[in-house]
Amino acid sequence: MKDKLQQAIALMQNSKLDKAAALFAEIIEEHPNDPVGYTNFGNLLLHMQDAERAQRFFEKAIELDPYAATAHYGLGNLYYEQSLYAKAQKHLQTAIEYGLMEADTYYLLGMTLQHQKYHKLALPYLLRAVELNPDDEEFLFQYGLSLAQCEHLKEAEEIFYKVLQKNDNHSDAYYNLGVIALYDEQPEKALEHFEEALRIQPDHVLAANGRKRVTAYLHERQ
């Protein structure tokens, strides 16, 4: 089973989805009481944007083994994609509880909490995701955003600068640095950051609004 499973996963990663599906179906037929085949088929179906069938496969895997952490992660991921954040949170927490303590799991759980406006609860999960995968630009940015939303502005500022070290064309990092500069009562510095965001992304609505407000303020102050 192990060799066949690795072969099917490799086919999926190489976008040979029909061949991967056929192989996963064989694995399930040969091992109908093993949750692994159902979980992987669920992942494939989710990748193919067939959420309805993917859900059934994840649920079948959990029915066979309630402690199948990867199946809980798959179901959590599915609910996250459907913006059903409370349901996603439940399954992602279960996945971690049952041993799937990986960066992606912590990140996705943090994001479900962010979307539910539980910013303080999201913070430790996003921090853990960054600790486990410090090279992921998106993990780092979302952690910075969570810090800012919890009003830890100095720490957030440091994180946004780290994001720019990884990607100096990250318009949202510049925008958020502009907002922090405004809170620090540094309008000229804020304007520079908004200008940079707009240089990178001319249609950045929030940065354009920030630039407009700061420019008007600086004009009135003269």
Image (cartoon, helix red, strand yellow):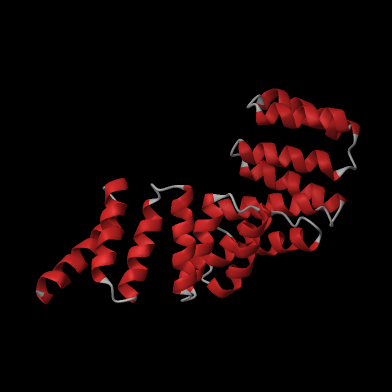
In the rendered image, which quarter contains the N terminus? Answer: top right
On the image, the x and y values in percent for residue 12 come to: 68, 30
In the rendered image, which quarter contains the C terminus? Answer: bottom left
Q: Which of the 4 quarters of the picture holds residue 177?
A: bottom left
Left or right of 64? Residue 203 is left
Q: Residue at x 66, y 24 (%)?
A: 16
Q: Residue at x 61, y 54 (%)?
A: 134
Q: Residue at x 56, y 61 (%)?
A: 111
On the image, the x and y values in percent for residue 130 come to: 61, 58
Is 171 located above or below residue 2 in the figure?
A: below
Residue 201 visible, this angle = no
Left or right of 165? Residue 217 is left
Depth check: 146 or 87 in front? 146
Left or right of 181? Residue 13 is right
Residue 125 visible, this angle = yes
Depth check: 167 or 141 in front? 167
